[in-house]
Amino acid sequence: MTTNFARHEQFLRIWKLLEFLETSRRPLSDDELVSHLKESLGLASLSQRTLGRDCEFLASCGYPIERQTLPDGRKQGWQFNRQGNDGNWWMPREPLTLLEMTAFLLSREQMRFAEGTVLWSGVESLWSKIAATLPPSLADQVAVMRGVWHVEGRTQPAYADRPRLLSLLCAAVTACCEIDLHLSATANEADSATSGDAAPTAPSGQLLTRFQPCGLVVRAGGMGLIGFPDGVSTGPPVLISLEHITNAKTRDKVFEPCGETVRELLGRATWPNGTPVD
C-alpha cells in the first residue's frame, strides 16, 4: 500500500490529460493542455516538460497519442489519433483513488454538524454508493487512512430536532420567497454555529416577519441564514444562526433578488442584535 499522495495526484493528472485528448478532434498545444489541467485540478503549477513526460507515458501504455503539427504549421501539439481503429478506441472506466477517498471522508467528518438534516442524509447516501463500489484492496487502504486522520468538530448534532428546517430555508432562498422566523436565545452561545467566536443571540422569542432569505452560510462548523428582515433590502443584511431558529413559515410573497453574492452580503452583515459579523 502506498500513502504517497503525490502518486495519486500524478494519476489524476494523467487521467484528466487522457480524457481531454480523447475528446478533442484536433491537435492541442502544450499551452492549452497545461492550462486545462491546472484549471481542472486546481494545480498551482505544471511545466511543459512534465506534460511531455505524461504524454509519453500514455503512449508507452498503448494509447495512440502522437506529436502532431498545429494548424499554424509552426509548432507541434499532442493528439489522440483514432486512425485505424474506427474511432472507437477503448477507454477504461475511471477508478477512485486513495487520495480522493481520503479527501471525501475528511469532508464528510467536517459535515457532522449537519447530522439529522437532509444535508447529512445526502452525505450518507453518497458515501454508501461510493463504499459499495470500492474494490476490497482499496477499501482496506481507506480503512487504514481513516485511522490516520482525526477531525475535531461538534460532539452533538445541532439541528437533529429540526430535520425539515434546512429544506424549507433552502427552498425559500431558491424561490425568493419571504418567510417568518421565530428566534430563541436558548441556544448555548459557546456552541454558536456561524462564527469562530460566540454569535450574539437574538432577544428571546423574537419574531422576524417578511424576512427575505438570500443564502445559507456554512462557517466554523455550523450553518446560518443570511437575508433582509421586514421585506426591505436597503438596510444591512442579517446573519442568523440556524440554532436560534425555532420555527419558520413561508409566506405567499416573492421578492426580487438583491443582485449580490452571499460572500458580498456576508462582508457587510450584522447579527440580529445589530452587532457586525466578524
Image (cartoon, rainbow, N blue to C red):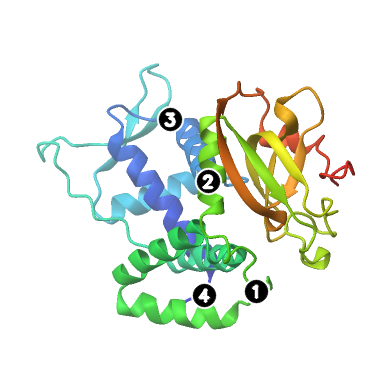
Q: CA distance from mark 4 to mark 2?
A: 42 Å
Q: CA distance from mark 1 to mark 2?
A: 22 Å
In contact (CB < 8 Å): disc 4 and disc 2: no
For disc 2, the neighbor class at 10 Å (few under 14, some 14 to 19, many from 20) is some
Residue 209 position, x and y percent, is 70, 36
Residue 192 position, x and y percent, is 77, 61
Residue corresponding to mark 3: 29
Looking at the rendered structure, the kind of residue marked 1 is: Gln
Q: Give SS at disc 3.
A: loop
Towards the viewer: 161 or 154: 161
The answer to whether residue 1 is visible is: no
For this view, does 255 lie left or right of residue 205?
Answer: left
Towards the viewer: 23 or 161: 161
Q: Which mark is residue 3?
A: 4
Q: Give SS at disc 1.
A: loop
Residue corresponding to mark 1: 156
Q: Which mark is residue 168?
A: 2
Look at discs 1 and 3 and give the one toward the viewer.
Answer: 1
Using the image, determine if residue 146 lies above or below residue 7.
below
Comes first in the chain, label 1 or label 2 = 1
Residue 255 position, x and y percent, is 60, 23
